[in-house]
Image (cartoon, helix red, strand yellow):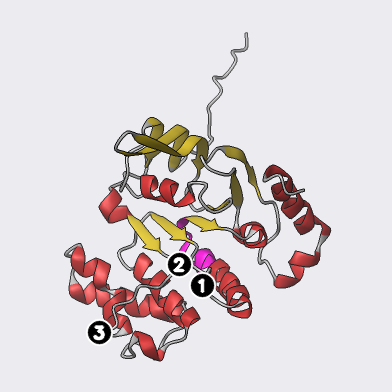
Amino acid sequence: MTMNAARIDTTPEPLIRLKGVRKVYRTGTREFVAVSDVTMDVNEGEMVSLVGPSGCGKSTLLKILAGLHDAEEGEVRIGNATSAFTPGRDVGMVFQQALLLKWRTILQNVILPAQILGLARREAEARARELLAMVGLSGFETKYPYELSGGMQQRAAIARALVHDPKLILMDEPFGALDALTREKMNLEMLRIWGESRKTIIFVTHSIQEAVFLGSQCAVLTAGPARMADHFPIDLPHPRTLDMKATPEFGAYTKRIYHLLGMG
């Protein structure tokens, strides 16, 4: 007699689970629905592009993930059976502006989160130097922000977000203020840094091409209040090159997003 073996589910538990998330801002008697019915799972080590029009709630969603806002409704779970999560310790953030402190050197800027968290200075400084090397800023440790270009400042900001070894990196339009050529170079750098760090990254952008080029997954939000129009994998090979943007496969993904946003 044979017995059927129990089926074991080997699907990894997601690091992030959002289900029916809704957020409402209130001013006096007025209400503004910023996020409505957002559902998404994100596995460890993924880079998820979050794309949508201005005012659709992308930044609000990042604040919910960072623990800065509570959701009005729905489930927000970050962390899994193998990876506990503490918002203040396990999140790194990169904004549209580098927001480096002008009176601190680049090295001093990068180690700032470690100092705030009370981490050992010697280890933090060693990690900061390693990260500056990873983002291509070796030799700039003693420079001040005004001595660096915009792209270099954003590289320093990325190193700062990684210095305390967070599980999740939230990036809010980090290359939006850069010129087109620098932005293309930073996209390539972002893929390299992600490949080396293997961090879980949520990358907010207005650029459909940037969303496709960077993401292992893409989440598309409609005009506010944000609703998840679609959430799908970007099945393009790595390493990705700028030439890839001219391929039919790349074009098919951009066309899909245009249609989801009512622009096709």
> Where does the image place residue 93, in percent across and percent down from the top left?
38, 61
Q: Which residue is drawn at 24% across and 73% down?
A: 123
> Where does the image place residue 24, in percent across and percent down from the top left?
39, 36
Q: Which residue is drawn at 27% across and 74% down?
A: 111
Q: What residue type is labelled 3?
A: Trp
Judged from the image, the secondary structure of the residue bearing numbered disc 2 is: loop
Is-magenta flag for residue 194?
Answer: yes
Kindly identify which residue carries mark 2.
Answer: 96
Kindly identify which residue carries mark 1.
Answer: 177
Q: In this view, does 30 lie above or below 116?
A: above
10 Å crowding of disc 3: few (<14), some (14-19), many (20+):
few
The magenta-colored residue range is 193-201
Q: Which quadrant does the N terminus fall into?
A: top right
Q: Is residue 225 above or below residue 91?
A: above
Q: Which amino acid does label 1 sit on?
A: Ala
- First in sequence: mark 1 vs mark 3: 3
Q: Residue at x 54, y 35 (%)?
A: 11
- Contact between marks 1 and 2 (CB within 8 A): the answer is yes
- Decide if residue 87 is on the left or right side of residue 135: left
In which quadrant of the rendered view does residue 77 lie? Answer: top left
Kindly identify which residue carries mark 3.
Answer: 103
- First in sequence: mark 1 vs mark 2: 2
Give the Cα distance between marks 1 and 2.
6 Å
- Decide if residue 39 is on the left or right side of residue 247: left
> Where does the image place residue 258, in percent across and percent down from the top left?
72, 50
Judged from the image, the secondary structure of the residue bearing numbered disc 1 is: loop
Give the Cα distance between marks 2 and 3.
20 Å
